[in-house]
Amino acid sequence: MEIIQIVGLGMIATFLALVVKEHKPIFAFLLTVFVGVIIFIFLIDQIAMIIHMLEELAAEANINLAYVQTVLQIVGIAYIAEFGAQIAKDAGQGAMASKIELAGKVLIMVMAIPIISVIIETIVRLIPS
């Protein structure tokens, strides 16, 4: 029941941040960021297990691992951009959060170009001349 530990840690950090925020807002923000990083570190083993499983499935299905790695990088960019945007929003920087989200979307599109190209080439080959 790791989720109970994660939620418990999050709830304790939230309560502490609310108490500390009245006197030292910067410490409340730092506490929030620190606990967010701790939760992410706590999940690294689970993320590694998922990546390993997907790579094994791709190898068994004879799928080019470069495509699987690209998809995993895209998912990683999405999660990291979301995490950064949420931190910026927590700090009251909505405009900066929007810029982080935009950067994540652009980087995802750049990373997806090789996969999109293969899909288009495959569709063109399937269409009769």
Image (spheres, rainbow, N blue to C red):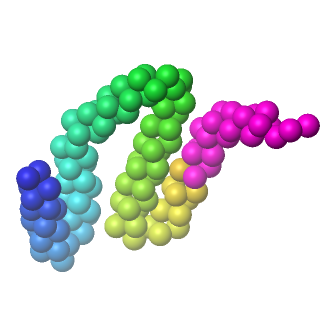
Residue at horizontal 75 percent and vertical 40 percent from the top: 123
Quadrant including the C terminus: top right
Magenta span main SS = helix
Q: Nearer the viewer, residue 21 or 124?
A: 124
Does any portion of residue 44 appear in the rendered image?
A: no
Q: Nearer the viewer, residue 71 or 18?
A: 71
Q: Percent from the top left, x then y, of residue 63?
A: 51, 26
Q: Is residue 55 above or below residue 115?
A: above
Q: Is residue 4 above or below residue 71?
A: below
Q: Percent from the top left, x then y, of residue 116?
A: 67, 40
Residue at horizontal 14 percent and vertical 61 percent from the top: 7
Is 119 within the magenta?
Answer: yes
The picture quadrant where one finds residue 124 is top right
Q: Looking at the image, which residue sits at the far bottom?
A: 22
Range drawn in magenta? 105-129
Q: Judge left or right: residue 80 versus residue 26.
A: right
Q: Nearer the viewer, residue 62 or 26?
A: 62
Q: Is residue 53 above or below residue 17?
A: above
Residue at horizontal 53 percent and vertical 63 percent from the top: 98
